[in-house]
Image (cartoon, helix red, strand yellow):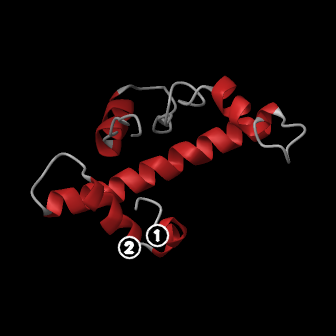
Amino acid sequence: MAAAVPEVNVAAASAVSAAVPNEEPEAPPTATVTSRPSRLPLSRVKALVKADPDVSLASQEAVFILARATELFVETMAKDAFTFAQQGKRKTLQRKDLDNAIEAADEFAFLEGTLD
């Protein structure tokens, strides 16, 4: 799951900057999504990439992009499955929630039958 991003009250930030005379108003602060670039260990991702006999070389950038794409995929899948768990008035994901998420979303069609 993604790290919690603090909400910024732009109106309050503007009021505070307007109260301080002779200073230029600041732009609202931008929050970073994560404090580290990837949550998956890049060494493990690189080992998985190298395990593919069709891959001879993989740059650090390619490994990072694969790790980040995997994180986003898992996050999206978990959010969609959690929606189905909430509809069942549960807080815990079950296999049926994943099955429902796969069936409901076209982008997960390639996963149909993988949990059987």
- The residue sitting at 45% across, 38% down in the picture is 28
Q: How many marks?
A: 2
Query: Is residue 50 placed above or below 54 in the rendered structure?
Result: above
Q: Going by the picture, which residue comes out furthest to the right?
A: 56
Mark 2 residue type = Glu
Q: Going by the picture, which residue comes out furthest to the left?
A: 89
Tell me: 86 left or right of 109.
Answer: left
Tell me: 94 left or right of 113.
Answer: left
Q: Which residue is mark 1?
A: 112
Image position, residue 50 (x, y; %)? 79, 35
Q: Secondary structure at mark 2?
A: helix
Image position, residue 3 (x, y; %)? 40, 34
Gap in angstroms between the C-alphas marked 2 and 1: 7 Å
- The residue sitting at 40% across, 62% down in the picture is 116
Looking at the image, which is closer to me, 25 or 90?
A: 90
Within 10 Å of disc 2 (Cα), the crowding (few <14, some 14-19, many 20+) is: some
Q: Secondary structure at mark 1?
A: loop
Q: Tag on residue 32?
A: none
Q: CB of mark 2 within 8 Å of CB of mark 1?
A: yes
Mark 1 residue type = Glu
- The residue sitting at 66% across, 33% down in the picture is 45
Tell me: 13 left or right of 46.
Answer: left
Looking at the image, which is closer to me, 114 or 77?
A: 114
Q: Which residue is mark 2?
A: 103
Query: Is residue 9 placed above or below 19 in the rendered structure?
Result: below
Q: Going by the picture, which residue comes out furthest to the front?
A: 116
